Image (cartoon, rainbow, N blue to C red):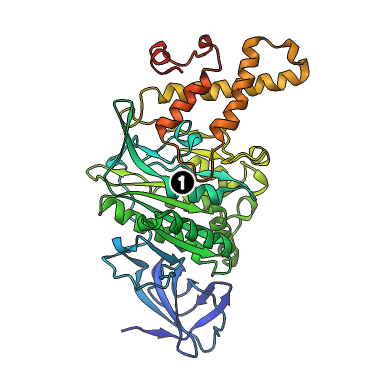
């Protein structure tokens, strides 16, 4: 039976300070009842000897310290998950948002997850095709990886996120010529935090138009929704992802956008608690908190499922040294950089080839034998082409050799044909590799120093 306490001392933002409450546990779930009998839920952020600080999952509007009562439920927040959640849209609190029937939970799971034993982790190496050449060909995504996208305000990361979610597939190349899509179940969980209503509707419409909604679950928190939802939303999405991956043996891709809004919500709650701020006002435990989300990606030995993460964040003032991208880069396995200069040139997707990085190599069994060598040669040749292009502005084209001019032509073709894709253009990894060889044919064969001669003989256009 619930025991109600009428000892609320203070209400500050989303936080409630309670006195004279013995044996309260960290992360314990509470219910607060206002004068009208309405119930709101929250969790214990800090537990003292006989005091507690509680964070509500909704706003505190209408609560009065004199009339409100609080009850401690003696359990952590658990989320009801089920395979039938695919094809549905939910709020940041995990409630049904699309007007459909309520979900009958197959299991209730702690939203904080269970840490994966490092000894049971399996090294990621199996390819996920996103249909975007600058990712598949240069910075391949693999099952179980965490590969963030670093963007900026006004850049098309929302469109890029939706395109990746719609097009991502688990594929394998057979005999170097046949692309086979895996018949293993694949699901996408899309978690949007602090987005505008227009962005939220854009995501929903995009999934429905392309038919991707059937294998996706959307969790959406808009800018007008309670800020605390932004802290719980990614944990709910990852809880469902872990269930589908490790208990239903599915390959799950979790896209988290925008992690900057998540970190800002964390900073606001920290300020309400009057904690000593760290860099740029963010709490000192920001690194640890982000790690509790990112490290939930992975593969477990003995399980055929996988959980892959693509966190997306907007860098304030395009500053890669800002705490959020800086700490994210330490935890994750590379980054995809969205470039403002390419965007201003009208190039989509404006993914920056130099500066983007995926630290995990793809197993050749799942793609084609020439992928790694072609990737190195393409990136190196583009960098050299851009360098010669800048040199030509100083010395003039007359000072350039024929080889130098070939590099400039390659760099220009690389931007207009390789990086540039239509917003619905879905290139297979074989299409991307064929296009790579076509562009490399602009250069003299003696310049292809990073590719084995047998690959040049076999695949050169």
Residue 63: x %, y % from top left: 54, 83
Query: Horizontally, is 220 left or right of 127 in the view?
Result: right
Crowding at mark 1 (Cα within 10 Å: few <14, some 14-19, many 20+): many
Q: Which residue is mark 1?
A: 164
* Residue 119 seen anywhere in this rendered image of the structure: yes
Quadrant for residue 113, please give it: bottom left
Q: Looking at this view, is 323 or 397 the one in front?
A: 397
Quadrant for residue 178, please give it: top left
Query: Horizontally, is 356 left or right of 255 in the view?
Result: right
Picture layout, residue 243 above or below residue 388:
below
Residue 61: x %, y % from top left: 57, 80
Query: Horizontally, is 325 left or right of 3 in the view?
Result: right
Count of picture labels:
1
Q: Residue at x 44, y 27 (%)?
A: 433
Quadrant in which the N terminus appears? bottom left
Q: Secondary structure at mark 1?
A: helix
* Residue 82 seen anywhere in this rendered image of the structure: no
Q: Residue at x 40, y 41 (%)?
A: 145
Q: Looking at this view, is 162 or 339 the one in front?
A: 162
Quadrant for residue 129, please give it: top left
Residue 394: x %, y % from top left: 77, 19
Q: Looking at this view, is 3 or 248 the one in front?
A: 248
Seen from this angle, which residue lies furthest left? 302
Picture layout, residue 11 above or below residue 253:
below
Picture layout, residue 443 above or below residue 54:
above
Q: Residue at x 54, y 80 (%)?
A: 9
Residue 147: x %, y % from top left: 46, 42
């Amino acid at each position: 039976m619930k025991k109600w306490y009428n000892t609320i001392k203070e209400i500050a933002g989303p936080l409630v300070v309670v006195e004279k409450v013995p044996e309260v546990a960290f992360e314990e779930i509470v219910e607060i009842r206002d004068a009208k009998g309405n119930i709101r839920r929250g969790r214990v952020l800090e537990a003292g000897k006989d005091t507690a600080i509680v964070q509500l999952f909704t706003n505190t509007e209408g609560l009065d310290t004199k009339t409100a009562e609080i009850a401690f439920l003696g359990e952590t927040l658990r989320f009801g998950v089920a395979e039938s959640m695919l094809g549905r849209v939910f709020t940041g609190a995990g409630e049904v948002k699309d007007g459909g029937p309520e979900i009958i939970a197959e299991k209730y799971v702690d939203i904080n997850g269970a840490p994966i034993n490092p000894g049971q982790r399996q090294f990621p190496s199996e390819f996920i095709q996103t249909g975007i050449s600058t990712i598949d060909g240069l910075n391949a995504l693999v099952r179980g990886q965490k590969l963030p996208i670093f963007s900026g305000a006004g850049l098309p990361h929302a469109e890029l996120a939706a395109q990746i979610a719609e097009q991502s597939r688990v594929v394998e190349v057979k005999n170097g010529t046949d692309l086979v899509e895996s018949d293993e179940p694949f699901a996408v969980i899309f978690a949007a935090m602090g987005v505008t209503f227009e962005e939220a509707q854009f995501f929903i419409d995009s999934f429905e138009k392309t038919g991707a909604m059937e294998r996706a679950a959307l969790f959406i928190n808009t800018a007008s929704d309670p800020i605390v939802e932004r802290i719980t939303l990614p944990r709910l999405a990852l809880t469902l992802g872990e269930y589908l991956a490790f208990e239903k043996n599915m390959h799950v891709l979790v896209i988290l956008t925008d992690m900057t809004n998540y970190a800002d919500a964390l900073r606001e709650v920290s300020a309400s608690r009057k904690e000593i701020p760290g860099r740029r006002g963010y709490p000192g435990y920001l690194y640890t908190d982000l790690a509790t989300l990112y490290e939930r990606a992975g593969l477990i030995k003995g399980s055929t499922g996988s959980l892959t993460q693509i966190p997306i964040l907007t860098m304030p003032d395009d500053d890669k040294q800002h705490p959020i991208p800086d700490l994210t880069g330490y935890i994750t396995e590379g980054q995809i950089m969205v470039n403002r200069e390419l965007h201003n040139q009208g190039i989509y997707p404006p993914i920056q080839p130099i500066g983007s990085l995926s630290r995990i190599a793809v197993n050749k069994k799942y793609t084609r034998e020439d992928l790694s060598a072609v990737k190195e040669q393409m990136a190196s040749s583009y960098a050299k082409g851009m360098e010669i292009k800048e040199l030509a502005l100083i010395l003039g084209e007359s000072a350039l050799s024929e080889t130098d001019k070939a590099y400039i032509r390659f760099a220009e073709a690389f931007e207009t044909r390789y990086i540039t894709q239509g917003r619905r253009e879905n290139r297979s990894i074989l299409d991307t590799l064929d296009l790579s060889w076509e562009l490399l044919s602009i250069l003299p064969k003696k310049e292809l120093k990073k590719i084995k001669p047998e690959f040049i003989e076999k695949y050169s256009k």
